[in-house]
Image (cartoon, rainbow, N blue to C red):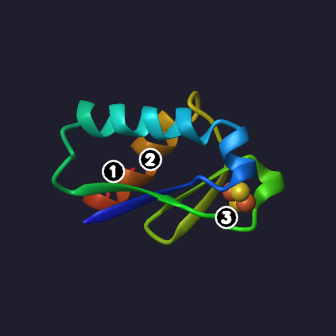
């Protein structure tokens, strides 16, 4: 099971983590990954000044938006799950 965590601390929330979560939910549905990818909210990762923070597995990514999450998802989730980039 791959875990994606999106920071929902106040700074990330104000910068749009809710929209990032909605987009990740769409991507999980679109690629039919519901059984192998879990999405969780997480509180402050202490990267507040770097835009919305997302963890995929144990890797931390910053400046995530509802526009750039698809590319990150496709790169990181597929490489974590299937070893492809
Ligand atoms: S609120 Fe998200 S890193 Fe601090």
Of circles 3 and 2, the one toward us is: 3
- State the separation of the CA atoms marked 1 and 2: 6 Å
Residue 73 pos. (x, y %): 44, 44
Please give the label number shown on residue 78.
Answer: 1
Q: Quadrant of the N terminus?
A: bottom left
Of circles 3 and 1, the one toward us is: 3
Q: In which quarter of the image is residue 45?
A: bottom right
> Which comes sooner in the sequence, label 3 or label 1?
3
User: Residue at the spot x=74%, y=68% of the render?
Assistant: 46
> Which comes sooner in the sequence, label 3 or label 2?
3
Determine whether label 3 and label 2 are within 8 Å by CB: no
- Which secondary structure lies at badge 2? helix
- Which secondary structure lies at badge 1? helix
Q: How crowded is mark 3: few (under 14 residues within 10 Å), some or many (20 or more)?
A: some
Residue, disc 2? 75
- Which secondary structure lies at badge 3? loop
Q: Quick check: 39 left or right of 7?
A: left
Residue 76 pos. (x, y %): 44, 53
Residue, disc 3? 44
Q: Quadrant of residue 53?
A: bottom right
Q: Does the residue labelled 3 lie within 8 Å of ligand 1?
A: yes
Determine whether label 1 and label 2 are within 8 Å by CB: yes
Q: On the rendering, which quadrant does ligand 1 occupy?
A: bottom right
């Amino acid at each position: 099971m791959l875990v994606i965590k999106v920071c929902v601390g106040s700074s990330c929330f104000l910068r749009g983590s809710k929209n990032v979560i909605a987009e990740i939910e769409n991507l999980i549905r679109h690629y039919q990954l519901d059984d192998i990818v879990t999405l969780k909210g997480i509180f402050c990762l202490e990267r507040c000044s770097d835009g919305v923070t997302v963890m995929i597995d144990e890797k931390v990514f910053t400046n995530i938006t509802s526009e750039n999450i698809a590319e990150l998802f496709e790169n990181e989730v597929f490489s974590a799950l299937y070893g492809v980039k």
